[in-house]
Image (spheres, rainbow, N blue to C red):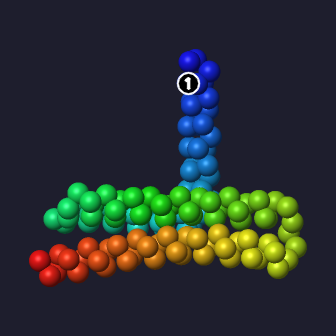
């Protein structure tokens, strides 16, 4: 049992270090954090159902998770080589695309929720 908690402790420390790195180094990550704070405040302030609120909050967190994965891809590609290469560009573009698709999902959820609110 001690081994489990030791490993859990280290996983939390390593995960936090990744989040801190992204916060310090990536403007995009900071932008998504601020956007999600605003989104969360609206989700908590508006008269949403628990399911709608959960969807909005979960999709916001998912966008930030994809931004962390995108940051990881960019870091590895940049570490491997400074050269321009089509495969490196494709890897970075796909990571960015994942962030975009998750943000699109969050945006769609907001549009549907706001339409429901407007239509009563």
Secondary element at tag 1: helix
Where residue 118 appears, as percent x and y from the top left, is 16, 81
Is residue 41 visible to us here?
Answer: no
Residue at 76% from the left image edge and 76% from the top image edge: 89
Residues 117 and 18: in front is 117
Where residue 67 appears, as percent x and y from the top left, is 57, 63
Residue extending farthest top? 2
Query: Where, quadrant-wise, is the N terminus in this rendering?
Result: top right
Among the 4 quarters of the image, the one containing residue 49: bottom left
Could you tell whether 56 is left or right of 96 in the image? left
Among the 4 quarters of the image, the one containing residue 108: bottom left
Residue at 31% from the left image edge and 58% from the top image edge: 54
Could you tell whether 78 is left or right of 70 in the image? right
| Residue, disc 1 | 5
Q: Is residue 119 above or below residue 74?
A: below
Could you tell whether 77 is left or right of 5 in the image? right
Where residue 60 appears, as percent x and y from the top left, is 42, 63
**Count of marks overlaid on the render:** 1
Query: Where, quadrant-wise, is the C terminus in this rendering?
Result: bottom left
Residue at 53% from the left image edge and 75% from the top image edge: 100
Residues 25 and 81: in front is 81
Q: Is residue 75 above or below residue 108?
A: above
Q: Quick one: label 1, few (<14), some, or many (20+) residues within 10 Å? A: few
Q: Is residue 87 above or below residue 4?
A: below
Is residue 106 visible to us here?
Answer: yes
Residue extending farthest left? 120
């Amino acid at each position: 049992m001690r081994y489990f908690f030791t490993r859990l402790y280290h996983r939390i420390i390593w995960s936090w270090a990744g989040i801190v790195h992204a916060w310090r180094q990536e403007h995009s990550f900071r932008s998504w954090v601020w956007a999600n704070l605003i989104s969360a405040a609206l989700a908590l302030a508006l008269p949403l159902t628990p399911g709608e609120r959960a969807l909005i909050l979960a999709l916001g967190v998912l966008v930030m998770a994809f931004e962390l994965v995108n940051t990881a891809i960019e870091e590895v590609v940049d570490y491997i080589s400074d050269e321009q290469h089509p495969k490196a560009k494709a890897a970075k573009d796909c990571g960015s695309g994942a962030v975009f698709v998750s943000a699109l999902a969050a945006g769609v959820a907001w549009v549907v929720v706001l339409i429901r609110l407007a239509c009563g």
